[in-house]
Image: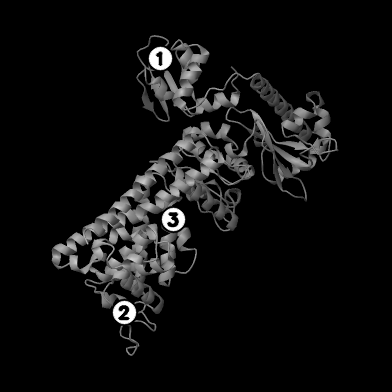
């Protein structure tokens, strides 16, 4: 049975050590760790600590130390393989089948660590030698101290195609290629990947060198070059400086995320040791999960230019489906054109601290970004804003968090436009009430039997039924204002019409159909007229003969509320199913397949509900 170091690390990461130990030992929370009386020796006061982030336990009394696997073997008395099988079953992982090649790969991985260690030592030697003068001058110009240069392992790759290859020839070209240190080209001898660059080692959480980043010295492109993905290095699952940030983060209770490793090093020198960075890519889902293991609300401190703000927004959108209670992102806004290093150098560490303390929560960053993305003067503009906010809300997988985001966006939206209505001049235009009195709109005809052949399918059919009911009975708009205010129909005209109706019901005590359509512009008037003529008898809440008197209107309101709930739920469900199908297409695992099938079943149940809702209304005809 061959188990690679990577597989064992994944097993450990999926096991919450405090929960595992807590099954047999009483544990209590102590800051970011847990404490207990040691199960390996008799003691009255707890000296046994459990660190979930690092995945180990340690007793300061008897020096017992280990991880989840060691706990199962030492405390439970299981064999190594029995411990592996039990932990893997709980973590939802399959134990690899016997594979002699896997053992060879594991041995090769250990050899690759030796290669990277040797490469790091050689790069450091080159920096300290004669050829390193220019690189040392650059580091001095950047303001890095001798201590910082040593702590972060700066080195130099000379501008030589075979310098490293020759120095590490004992490992052989194939291993150097697999480690990402040499480039292999057909019909040519392999040559050094990094040449004429300042070298920064990239380490794993255990402090082992797994890759390098190189900054060009002088002119040339690319400015920064990272190692390619290798058996040791996956840039989407690695955070630069994680090994140093983790212990610092436990002291500060925070973690700062910047764009690049030079910013990390500069901030660490300025006293912000709890800083990490992604590696040349947008923040990934895996990296966000890694950040949440250190702090519930990591601080994203990206550059104050357009590219930095776009990177912040990409991270925000990527985090939405992952949000869970208590865990989110905070966003730090830097002065325009400055990066974190610029702020510290120009204004000092105190200035950056103040910016960190003034960070925005995720919900506020999304709101401000969307509000600033374009004009909001026309109804269509406001409908577009509401639609974008609705799309963000729909991306949140957790139902409770999704509801709170919808409430927060709705409150901000209402406050913004109530303020605009109270401060803006009176409406003007060709279709405003009291103007252009000679313009005659056609009489609104009663709903007809052509409803049953109305050209719409699925949820659009339901949306148009709801809008038609609100137009016929504007008194229902106020009753369902809260439920409707965070819904954005996919059709832009319907979205604009709903926005007008909600705004009018908010500002006027009473509203009738004629008064409502009078304030519509020509385009929305035609939309409303089509709705009023077309879908009158499909739904009970649209049929005049069933809505006579207050009881009838009350029943219609109840049916309409159910229709609104169905109307709002379907887009989020369809999007979740699409997302699950997409993830399954990328990597078909038991988890992605099960999630896709669960959502397919949920959608079928939901569709059956809509069908029954239609039938119920038809049966009452």
The location of residue 191, given as percent across then percent down, is 82, 36
Residue 465 is at least partly visible in this image: yes
User: Which callout, 3 or 2, points at the residue further toward the start of the chain?
Assistant: 3
Mark 2 vs mark 1, CA separation in Å: 78 Å
Instruction: Residue at the far bottom: name it.
Output: 438
Residue 38, label in figure: 1
Residue 583 vs 434, above or below: the answer is above
**In this picture, residue 509 sits left or right of residue 331:** left
Residue 359 vs 193, above or below: the answer is below
SS for dot 3: helix
**Which residue is at a point 46% across and 19% down the rendered structure image?**
86
SS for dot 2: helix
User: Which callout, 1 or 3, points at the residue further toward the start of the chain?
Assistant: 1
Q: Nearer the viewer, mark 1 or mark 3?
A: 3
SS for dot 1: loop
**Viewer-side residue, 440 vs 51:** 440
**In this picture, residue 519 sits left or right of residue 492:** left
**Which residue is at a point 41% across and 76% down the rendered structure image?**
523
Give the residue at mark 2. Answer: 518
Q: Are marks 3 and 2 in contact (CB under 8 Å)?
A: no
Image quadrant holding the N terminus, namely: top right
Would you call the spot at circle 1 few (<14 residues within 10 Å), some (14-19), or many (20 or more)? many
Residue 391, label in figure: 3
């Amino acid at each position: 049975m061959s188990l690679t170091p990577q597989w064992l690390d994944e097993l450990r990461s999926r096991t919450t050590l405090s929960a595992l130990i807590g099954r047999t030992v009483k544990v209590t929370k102590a800051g970011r760790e847990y404490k207990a009386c040691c199960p390996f020796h008799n003691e009255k006061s707890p000296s046994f600590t459990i660190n979930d982030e690092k995945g180990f336990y340690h007793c300061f009394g008897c020096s017992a130390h280990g991880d989840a696997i060691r706990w199962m073997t030492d405390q439970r008395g299981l064999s190594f393989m029995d411990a592996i099988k039990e932990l893997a079953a709980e973590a939802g992982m399959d134990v690899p089948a016997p594979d002699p090649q896997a053992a060879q790969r594991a041995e090769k991985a250990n050899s690759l660590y030796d290669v990277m260690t040797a490469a790091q030592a050689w790069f450091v030697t080159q920096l300290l030698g004669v050829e390193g003068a220019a690189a040392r001058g650059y580091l001095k110009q950047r303001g890095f101290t001798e201590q910082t240069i040593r702590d972060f392992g700066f080195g130099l790759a000379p501008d030589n195609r075979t310098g490293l290859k020759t120095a590490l020839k004992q490992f052989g070209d194939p291993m150097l290629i697999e480690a990402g240190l040499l480039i292999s080209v057909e019909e040519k001898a392999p040559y050094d990947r990094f040449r004429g660059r300042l070298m920064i080692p990239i380490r794993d959480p255990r402090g082992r060198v797994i890759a390098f980043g190189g900054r060009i010295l002088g002119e040339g492109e690319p400015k920064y070059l990272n190692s390619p993905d290798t058996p040791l290095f996956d840039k989407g699952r690695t955070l630069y400086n994680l090994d140093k940030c983790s212990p610092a983060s436990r002291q500060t209770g925070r973690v700062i995320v910047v764009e690049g490793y030079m910013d990390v090093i500069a901030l660490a020198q300025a006293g912000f040791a709890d800083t990490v960075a992604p590696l040349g890519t947008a923040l990934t889902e895996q990296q966000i999960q890694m950040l949440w293991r250190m702090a519930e609300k990591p601080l994203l401190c990206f550059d104050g230019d357009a590219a930095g703000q776009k990177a912040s927004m990409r991270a925000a959108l990527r985090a939405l489906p992952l949000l869970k209670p208590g865990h989110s992102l905070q966003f730090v806004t830097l002065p325009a054109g400055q990066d974190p290093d610029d702020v510290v150098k120009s204004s000092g560490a105190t200035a950056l601290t103040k910016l960190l303390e003034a960070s925005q929560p995720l919900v506020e960053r999304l709101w401000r970004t969307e509000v600033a993305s374009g004009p909001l003067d026309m109804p269509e503009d406001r409908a577009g804003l509401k639609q974008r906010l609705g799309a963000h809300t729909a991306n949140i997988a957790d139902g409770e968090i999704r509801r709170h985001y919808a409430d927060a966006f709705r409150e901000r939206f209402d406050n913004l436009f109530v303020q605009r209505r109270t401060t803006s001049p009176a409406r003007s235009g060709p279709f405003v009430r009291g103007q252009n009195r000679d313009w005659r709109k056609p009489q609104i005809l009663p709903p007809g039997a052509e409803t049953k052949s109305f050209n719409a399918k699925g949820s659009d059919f339901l949306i148009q039924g709801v809008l038609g009911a609100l137009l016929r009975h504007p008194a229902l708009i106020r009753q369902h204002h809260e439920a409707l205010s965070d819904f954005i129909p996919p059709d832009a005209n319907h979205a604009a019409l709903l926005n007008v109706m909600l705004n009018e019901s908010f500002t006027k005590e009473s509203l009738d159909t004629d008064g409502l359509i009078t304030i519509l512009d020509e385009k929305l008037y035609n939309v409303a007229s089509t709705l009023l003529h077309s879908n009158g008898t499909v739904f009970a809440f649209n049929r005049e003969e069933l809505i006579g008197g207050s009881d009838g209107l009350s029943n219609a309101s109840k049916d309409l509320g159910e229709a609104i709930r169905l109307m709002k739920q379907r887009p989020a469900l369809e999007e979740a199913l699409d997302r699950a199908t997409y993830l399954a297409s990328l990597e078909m695992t038991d988890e992605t397949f099960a999630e896709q099938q669960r959502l397919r079943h949920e959608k079928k149940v939901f569709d059956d509900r809509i069908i029954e809702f239609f039938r119920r209304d038809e049966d009452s005809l």
